[in-house]
Image (spheres, grey):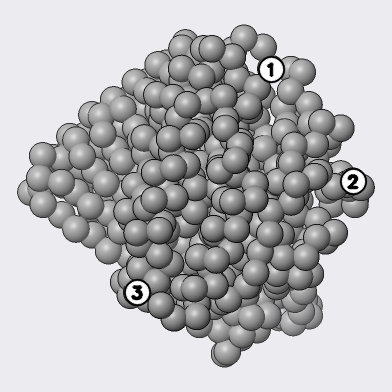
């Protein structure tokens, strides 16, 4: 066993011994999932993930294993800054749950507008009906043999969040779940877990936010499972505002039944290492997914978008549209894989990744791919990476616009094409405001 594997296994076992395995959750599935994930990790170890050259071909995850992280036992006092206030108290966030350093913050959370139309509860506070849903759904979509980080999340699971959108209900106000890492704790680790169940004929929007101010190393491994029943519709808006010290390895898994629609909009600023992993299973006929994303990197940030869509039935549709803006010596990875199974006739699938390079020292590795076993399909993919064109710069400067302003206009125009895909005007303006407040220095 090498030092990397030895270190992370020691930290992992310490987490369990001190805080988790002694705590019996009132939800049976939490306890069984935790045990099975712990056994899986011990059998595989972290080296099995490092050794997966195809999965991590362009991303080095060894630095994560070298760090010594700890889990916080108490919630920290949190005083929001001006940007936090815009995010937390923005009118698009009327239904909001705020987690600070892994602990729910009652002071800034507000779900008073939620009625019987939806159900939001922590696993710990779940009633008998909630427990039945959690026991049935939790962990159903996660394969611990395929992803060590999801395994770690499950093994260190202490509590989670259930969002259950009930049958025939349309929820007009988004539900916001915001995770904030402060700078008050060194090498803190958090493992958020969200379970979303969209019942038949339901419709809702979720805003998922991750914000980090840590100047020391921090680790976030969020996992969100989304189970979509017949004729359900979900808009999932996700943003990650990282920094140069944090690691964020995120995993979203979605299962879609007949005539269901999942629309995802991801906005990420760079972290030391960030991974946005999305796995979609189009199980029912006429199910549909749209994955849109914007990622911005600077300094020595590294972000890896790993998107996987499985078409398992006829008349299913998928679309991937991502854009990246890279500056300084940053790195980005885009891996988009679409699998069309043999019986998935009449499939329509497209994917596109476009990148704007602001420095000769950046690096982008982009790999859209199609794996098709059906013969009656419409599929296409493409990827580009380019600098500013001389023609565009000349056009703006010839009209009296200085070079810096011209670059800024071109960058914002490049980004806005993604935001135009967002159906909610509130969220679109909200994301644009975050872009203005957190954008790279031009």
Callout 1: few (<14), some (14-19), or many (20+) C-alpha neighbours within 10 Å? some
How far apart in space, not on screen, are marks 1 and 3 (Cα)?
A: 45 Å
Q: Can you give x and y, in whole percent of width and height, for residue 272 in the image?
A: 63, 72
The quarter in which the C terminus is drawn is bottom right
Is residue 196 something that shows in the picture?
Answer: yes
Q: CA distance from mark 2 to mark 1?
A: 26 Å
Residue 159 left/right relative to 2 = right
Q: Quadrant of the image for the N terminus?
A: bottom left
> Are the residues tagged 2 and 1 within 8 Å (C-beta)?
no
Task: Write the residue at 15% across / 54% down.
Answer: 372
Residue 157 in the image: x percent, y percent? 55, 42
Which circle's residue, 1 or 3, is located before the other in the chain? 3
Give the mark nearer the N terminus: 3 vs 2: 3
- Mark 2 secondary-structure assignment: loop
Q: Quadrant of residue 331?
A: bottom right
The residues bearing labels 3 and 2 have C-alpha atoms spaced at a distance of: 40 Å
In the foreground, 361 or 121: 121
Classed neighbour count for the residue bearing mark 2: other residues with Cα under 10 Å, few (<14), some (14–19), many (≥20): few
Vertical placement of 391 versus 195: above or below?
below
Give the residue number, with chain letter if any, for mark 1.
114
Q: Which residue lies under the disc numbered 2? A: 77
Element type at mark 3: loop
What label sits on residue 51 in the rendered view?
3
The residue shown at (34%, 59%) is 43
Q: How far from the left and from the top, in percent, is residue 255? A: 35, 35
Would residue 169 be visible to someone looking at this image? Answer: no
Tell me, yes or no, whether the two marked residues, 3 and 2, touch with CB atoms within 8 Å: no
Which residue appears at 65% of the width and 69% of the height? Answer: 68
Q: Nearer the viewer, residue 111 or 181?
A: 181
Is residue 44 found left or right of 31 in the rendered image? left
Q: Residues within 10 Å of mark 3 (few under 14, many from 20)?
A: few
């Amino acid at each position: 066993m090498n030092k990397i594997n030895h270190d992370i296994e020691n930290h992992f076992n310490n987490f369990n011994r001190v805080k988790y395995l002694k705590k019996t959750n009132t939800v049976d599935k939490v306890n069984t999932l935790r045990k099975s994930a712990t056994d899986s990790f011990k059998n595989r170890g972290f080296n099995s993930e490092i050794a997966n050259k195809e999965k991590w071909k362009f991303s080095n995850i060894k630095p994560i294993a070298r760090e010594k992280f700890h889990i916080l036992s108490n919630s920290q006092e949190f005083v929001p800054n001006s940007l936090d206030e815009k995010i937390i108290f923005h009118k698009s966030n009327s239904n909001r749950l705020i987690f600070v350093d892994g602990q729910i913050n009652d002071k800034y959370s507000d779900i008073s507008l939620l009625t019987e139309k939806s159900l939001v509860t922590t696993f710990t506070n779940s009633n008998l009906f909630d427990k039945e849903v959690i026991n049935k759904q939790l962990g159903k979509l996660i394969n611990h043999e395929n992803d060590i980080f999801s395994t770690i999340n499950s093994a260190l699971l202490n509590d989670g969040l259930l969002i259950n959108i009930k049958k025939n209900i349309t929820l007009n106000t988004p539900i916001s779940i915001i995770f904030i890492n402060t700078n008050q704790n060194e090498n803190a680790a958090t493992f958020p877990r969200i379970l979303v169940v969209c019942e038949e004929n339901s419709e809702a929007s979720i805003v998922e936010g991750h914000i980090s101010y840590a100047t020391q190393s921090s680790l976030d491994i969020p996992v969100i499972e989304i189970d979509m029943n017949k004729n359900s519709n979900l808009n999932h808006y996700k943003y990650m505002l990282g920094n140069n010290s944090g690691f964020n390895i995120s995993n979203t898994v979605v299962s879609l039944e007949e005539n269901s629609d999942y629309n995802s909009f991801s906005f990420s600023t760079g972290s030391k290492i960030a991974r946005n992993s999305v796995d979609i299973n189009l199980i029912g006929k006429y199910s549909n997914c749209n994955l849109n994303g914007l990622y911005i990197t600077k300094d020595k940030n590294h972000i890896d978008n790993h998107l996987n869509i499985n078409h398992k039935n006829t008349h299913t549709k998928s679309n991937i549209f991502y854009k990246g803006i890279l500056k300084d010596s940053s790195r980005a990875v885009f891996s988009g894989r679409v699998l069309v199974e043999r019986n998935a006739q009449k499939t329509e699938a497209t994917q596109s990744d476009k990148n704007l390079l602001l420095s000769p020292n950046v690096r982008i590795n982009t790999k859209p791919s199609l794996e098709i076993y059906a013969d009656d399909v419409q599929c296409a993919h493409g990827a580009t990476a380019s600098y500013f064109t001389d023609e565009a710069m000349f056009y703006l400067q010839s009209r009296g616009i200085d070079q810096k302003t011209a670059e800024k206009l071109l960058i914002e125009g490049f980004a806005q094409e993604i935001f135009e895909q967002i159906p909610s005007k509130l969220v679109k303006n909200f994301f644009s405001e975050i872009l203005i407040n957190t954008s790279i220095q031009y």
